[in-house]
């Protein structure tokens, strides 16, 4: 069975601090995809990143970076120099291989609060 | 480019009633997925449609059904509502046949069952 675990339910930081959101996944598929989505108070989830199981390169996009480690089944997300606008719920998600793209298994989410 | 539009945004129903939720995907997107979000169960996949055909289905009872029209618009229906069906129902669209999992979500329809 596929499963995504986000152990941190809530994180509170002060603006400009760095923060890492943890994500651990379980799957028996050899081909799979990992995602991070952001859910602001308005409700709609916003896609942040997609990684396939064959690409373990870390990625950086502005203040955001992602660390994918197959050996530990983890896909962690770091926000550098956090800002108030980063306050949201962040979800890690997993999908299987071919034909499963619309079916995401989400973690329980981590609510990030960035205080000024 | 208009985003994913879901209607109604809020609705209140009583147990035993049925409800229909509508989703208009981004223009040109042919795949539509539905998710249920509750505080207890989190985000759970309901079903996915592509070209009017159900492509994937989650583990929900038969009271939950959906369909997609030729213009890619989708509806989901919940019959014989139960209190536990109170949730935010999110619709997401994606461009093509090969769904990469990069989904574009609407703001959801918040259903309250009394």
Image (cartoon, coloured by chain):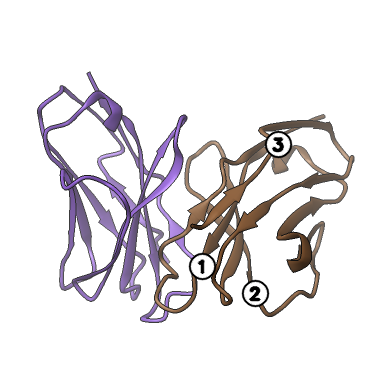
The answer as to whether the residues below labels 2 and 1 share one chain is no
Mark 1–mark 3 Cα distance, whole angstroms, equals: 24 Å
Classify residue A65 by image quadrant: bottom right
Q: Residue at x 25, y 24 (%)?
A: B83
- Between A65 and B6, the one nearer to me in the picture: A65
Which of disc 3 and disc 2 is earlier in sequence? 3
- Write down the chain letter for disc 1: B
Q: Residues within 10 Å of mark 3 (few under 14, many from 20)?
A: some
Evaluate whether residue A67 shows in this view: no
**View extreme (top): residue:** B114
Question: Is residue B98 toward the left or the right of residue A40 in the image?
Answer: left
Chain A palette colour: brown
Report helix, strand or loop for mark 3.
loop
**Which chain did the renderer colour purple?**
B
Q: Which mark is residue A8?
A: 3
SS at mark 1 in the image: loop
- The answer for how far apart the CA atoms under marks 2 and 1 are is 15 Å
Where does the C terminus of chain A fall, quadrant-wise?
top right
Residue wearing tag 2: A53
**Chain label for disc 3:** A
């Amino acid at each position: 069975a596929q499963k995504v675990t986000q152990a941190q339910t809530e994180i509170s930081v002060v603006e400009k601090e760095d923060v890492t959101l943890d994500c651990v996944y379980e799957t028996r598929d050899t081909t799979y995809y990992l995602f991070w989505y952001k859910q602001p108070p308005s409700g709609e989830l916003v896609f942040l990143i997609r990684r396939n199981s064959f690409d373990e390169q870390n990625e950086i996009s502005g203040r955001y970076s992602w660390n994918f480690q197959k050996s530990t089944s983890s896909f962690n997300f770091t926000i550098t120099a956090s800002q108030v606008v980063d306050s949201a719920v962040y979800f890690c998600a997993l999908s299987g291989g071919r034909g499963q793209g619309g079916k995401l298994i989400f973690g329980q989410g981590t609510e990030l609060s960035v205080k000024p | 480019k208009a985003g994913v539009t879901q209607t109604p945004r809020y609705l209140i129903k009583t147990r035993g009633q049925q409800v229909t939720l509508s989703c208009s995907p981004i223009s040109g997107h042919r795949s539509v997925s539905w998710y249920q979000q509750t505080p207890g169960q989190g985000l759970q996949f309901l079903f996915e449609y592509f070209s009017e055909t159900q492509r994937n289905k989650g583990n929900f009872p038969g009271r939950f059904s959906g369909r997609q029209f030729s213009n890619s618009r989708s509806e989901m229906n919940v019959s014989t509502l139960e209190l536990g069906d109170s949730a935010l129902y999110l619709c997401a669209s994606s461009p093509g046949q090969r769904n990469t999992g990069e989904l574009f979500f609407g703001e959801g329809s918040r259903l309250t069952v009394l």
